[in-house]
Image (cartoon, helix red, strand yellow):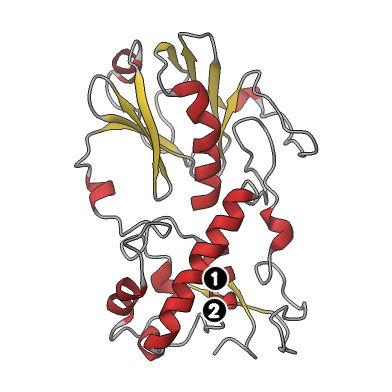
Amino acid sequence: MPELPEVETVRAGLEPVLVGRSLARVEARRPDLRFPLPDGFVQRLTGARVLNLRRRAKYLLAGLDRGGALLMHLGMTGRFEVEGAAMRDGFALAAPADAKHAHILFETDEGVRITFYDARRFGFMDLVEDDDRRLLALGPEPLGADFDATVLARAFAGRRQGPKTLLLDQRVVAGLGNIYVCEALHRARISPTQPAASVAPRRLEPLVAAIKDVLGEAIAAGGSSLRDFAAANGELGYFQHSFRVYDQEGEPCPNRGCRGTIRRTVQAGRSTFFCPTCQR
């Protein structure tokens, strides 16, 4: 599933063609994605002007001049394509999306066509207000100033769950996913499985820094393309070439001075990659 860097990459690709433009045409080629589209979806969006496009956790929110926002979630295989979007030299491109999975079409008053594809239909769209319960329940943004060691200290206090489990809880911190939590915990040399309450307070600030660094580097690389993810102009992400532990089972630990080997375990049904030698 796309995580924060991938969603931010998509947002940055859509922003130049959506913000300030009116939706001259909206077409829903099916009545549902993961969930049914809201009543009057096409009629309520047609003619609306997009005021801004922001990301909250793994959601995209297009603010509308009619009030409220179009909320969008990529799910596992969701992908936007902008017709005629410019490509950067040297960037690999994803294979064209299958037309049979083209479910939602937006056309702006400039004639730009934006198509949402979703092979498995785990993504969804909705029309929401600022007080939508899904947004109010989210924790702080990990790249924001209000995410710091104090936030983690509160979340970890008295908890027997591992740090990885808690960092994946969107109520603790918004937008983190499996890949980047594994990578950040490895950089901070913190075990993903030890009880979170046992992590010394002095180690929380370096963990916050590692989370911010990993996310920043991944955004700069256009996210990670493992299966279906591609930017709005079709470019593949490159951060998967920088993974230190994720999907690196059996490889030597890259942390300086460590002679350990990356292992894989399963936590709550999800693969965790870590070094048992230096992550303690």
Query: Which mark is on residue 269?
Result: none
Q: Residue at x 45, y 84 (%)?
A: 203
Q: Based on the displayed image, in which of its 4 quarters is residue 272 positioned?
A: bottom right
Pick the residue in front: 196 or 220: 220
Pick the residue in front: 97 or 112: 112
How far from the left and from the top, in percent, is residue 258? Answer: 71, 88
Viewer can see residue 264: yes
Q: Amino acid at mark 2?
A: Ala
Q: Amino acid at mark 1?
A: Ala
Q: Residue at x 68, y 24 (%)?
A: 86
* Element marked by disc 1: helix
Q: Residues within 10 Å of mark 1 (few under 14, many from 20)?
A: many
Check the picture and name the quadrant holding the C terminus: bottom right
* Marks 1 & 2, CB-CB < 8 Å contact: yes
Viewer can see residue 269: no
Number of dots carrying numbers = 2
- Distance from label 1 to label 2 (Cα)? 6 Å
- 70 displayed left or right of 272: left
Residue identified by numbered label 2: 188
How far from the left and from the top, in percent, is residue 10? Answer: 54, 38
Residue identified by numbered label 1: 184
How far from the left and from the top, in percent, is residue 109? Answer: 45, 8
Q: Residue at x 50, y 44 (%)?
A: 8
Does residue 182 lie above or below 117 as drawn? below
* Element marked by disc 2: loop
Does residue 103 lie above or below 120 as drawn? above
